[in-house]
Amino acid sequence: MDLQLKDKIVVVTGAAGIKGSIGETIVQSLANEGAIPVIVCRNDRGYGYEKELQEKGIDALFVKTDVTDTKQIEAAVKSIVEKYGRIDVLINNVGVNDGAGLDASIDDFVWSLKLNLISYFAMTKYCLPYIIKSKGNILNIGSKVALTGQGGTSGYAASKGGVLALTREWAVDLIKEGIRVNALIIAESWTPAYDNWIKTLENGEEKLKEIVNKIPLENRMTTPQEIADSCLFTISNKSSHTTGQHILIDGGYVNLDRSLLTE
């Protein structure tokens, strides 16, 4: 299926994670579709990803940015527009489950909001004039923690709850502009970071089995590629009448009846 993303300027935040992470997989998938991925992230891995894509003849840009600093976000958007003259799609992908729970300091809680929620608002605010001009769209990456809770991560839960609320709010605000705004909600995805976390546990294999047994569809985690595929479809014109939606890519983890689970 041709998603008609060729030469679209697609900005992806938090996309310089470990190879195989959700953000990096989205970037590679965009490149494969002929889009022009712009990585906005604080990690220097972004320089390597930019070089790797350019060596394949793919136009790509990395703008090193600490998204907890709104001034850096403003400067990043300015740099993107100076190079390309437009922005077609924004994918707000930042997410760090930082464990800022009720026992955390107020400063830690606020920092979590800055990273996981305020960065979404700031990126959207500064990209919006260009998205309106290009008649593009916005996709927010959310988490099941906003719907289910998790315990011990108030900052992340509040942020991701806010992301889902803002998705609906912005969809309403931007109806008059014909701009679509959606959110993809992820539950358990087998990323390199998840693998690294499992390896830190004494009973890692046992814990992993316990988690996957709770995922109704095929008792397995969602792959980053499955998430990237859903992202690309949602931002494409193939989803031209979809807005204000919370789309769960989770193998039924959040909404399906627990009676499906046989173990």
Image (cartoon, rainbow, N blue to C red):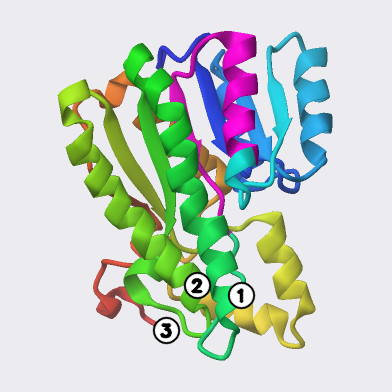
State which region is magenta: 72-95
Q: Label 1 amino acid? A: Asp
Q: Compare marks 2 and 1 and give the one earlier in the sequence.
A: 1
Q: Could you say which is closer to the camera, residue 121 or residue 201?
A: 121
The 10 Å Cα crowd at callout 3, few under 14, some 14 to 19, many 20 or more, is few
Asked whether the viewer can see residue 243, the reply is no
Please state the horizontal and vertical placement of residue 144, each as a whole percent of the image: 40, 65
Q: Which residue is mark 2?
A: 155
Q: Residue at x 75, y 20 (%)?
A: 53
Q: What distance separates the C-alpha of mark 2 from that of mark 3?
A: 32 Å
Instruction: Please identify the quadrant where the C terminus is shown.
Output: bottom left
- Which-is-in-front pick, marks 2 and 3? 2
Side (left or right) of 164 relative to 173: right
Please state the horizontal and vertical placement of residue 84, each as a whole percent of the image: 59, 10
- Which-is-in-front pick, marks 1 and 3? 1
Instruction: Please identify the quadrant where the N terminus is shown.
Output: top left
Q: Compare marks 1 and 3 and give the one earlier in the sequence.
A: 1
Side (left or right) of 202 relative to 90: right
Q: Which residue is mark 3?
A: 263
Q: What distance separates the C-alpha of mark 1 from that of mark 3?
A: 38 Å
SS for callout 1: helix
Do residues under tags 2 and 1 come within 8 Å of each other at their CB atoms? yes
Asked whether the viewer can see residue 201, the reply is yes
